[in-house]
Image (cartoon, grey):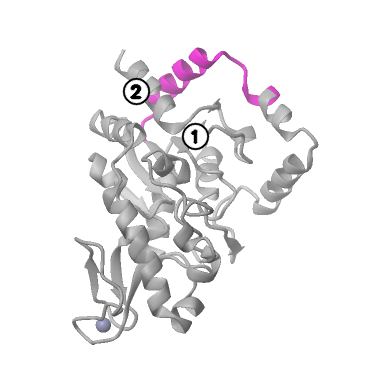
Amino acid sequence: MSVAFSISEDSFYHEPSFSLSLEDNIHTFSQTNLMSNVSLYNDMEDGRGHADARVFAGTYEQDIARAASLISSAKHAIALTGAGVSVESGIPTFRGRDGLWNKYNPIELATPEAFARNPVLVWKWYAWRIGLVMSAVPSAAHSALYDMEKMGVIKWVITQNVDDLHERAGSRNVVHLHGIILRARCTKCDYSIWWNDVPKIPPIPKCESCGEPLRPDVIWFGEPLNEEALSKAWGIAQSSDLILVIGTSAVVYPAAAIPLVVKENGGKIVEINPDVTPLTPYADVYIKEGASYALRKILEALKK
Ligand SMILES: [Zn+2]
């Protein structure tokens, strides 16, 4: 398998944007067809109505019951989580909310070029974000996913989020597609560290092994995904027969392709999102709801 992805760590709890090139046929669904379907869908004047007609077959309670039933009968169910899960932990999104960083475009801070130009500025921004993550607490959504892992119904959580809230809720099997903000790695050697406290900037942190600057261990705009994380996520998706897609707009690759890999292999998609996404027409059950509320309801149904 040879996959070249170019991705970007966007902002805190906003979806990164990706550009993708598939160097060979890694799976049978057609990327081109998928993308044209998605854009057709988006081009429709009333795309939302289209999706509603397509997926809202039952009442809300019926959808919850059906989601729970699909999850409990799956042999290898997994979850894909995005911004919508972390937002419910009470951390503000940084766009337009924090005066300190309002004048900066996150896209101009989360790049290798920005770091080369002004590492102190980039590190100050990350220190602020690290502080937000450290003071946040897992939401009911994080806890429900942990409960489902304990019950043996969810095998893995693949997350686009760079915080550690799944782990702090108790989840053990977590793959971070976009890295983790609480870790820093050397720009030159293999050295990495975890932050126990918010780093004090300046000075910028240096590698204890070789003395070169450390950088946040996240994926920046224009950088490829971590190959190990990506191939792990891909392997997990390929052996799964159900994916719960929660709080992600499912428009960015490769994360967006993961549910479709499951679908292509005959698996089911259960989507939880307050807003219809390009994935919604592919979902077997779509629950138009925030992550915490919907997952708690599903968990209750699973326990019955
Ligand atoms: Zn080093």
- Residue 24 in the image, given as x and y percentages of width and height: 59, 63
Membership of 70 in magenta stretch: yes
Dominant SS type (magenta): helix
Label 2 SS: helix
| Badge number at residue 299 | 2
Q: Which residues are magenta?
A: 53-76
Q: Which amino acid lies under the numbered mark 1 shown in the image of this protein? A: Gly
Given the image, on which type of amino acid does mark 2 rest? Leu
- Residue at image mark 1: 267
Q: Are marks 1 and 2 in contact (CB under 8 Å)?
A: no
The quarter of the picture where residue 301 lies is top left
At which x and y percent is residue 144?
Answer: 32, 30
Q: Quadrant of ligand 1?
A: bottom left
Residue at image point 46% right, 19% down: 64
Considering only order in the chain, which callout, 2 or 1, is on the residue closer to the N terminus?
1
Magenta stretch contains residue 218: no
Asked whether residue 239 is in view, the answer is: no
Q: Nearer the viewer, residue 169 or 37?
A: 169
Residue drawn at 73 percent across, 40 percent down: 41
The x and y percentages for residue 251 are 59, 49
Question: Residue 141: which quarter of the image?
Answer: top left
The answer to whether residue 104 is left or right of residue 139 is right
What residue appears at the point 53 percent right and 53 percent down from the top-left corner?
A: 96
Image quarter in which the C terminus is found: top left
Please determine whether, in this image, residue 41 is positioned above or below residue 147.
Answer: below
In percent of the image, x 37 and y 72: which residue is there?
123
Judge left or right: residue 22 versus residue 220.
right
Indicate the secondary structure of the residue bearing disc 1.
loop
Badge 2: how crowded within 10 Å, few (<14), some, or many (20+)?
some
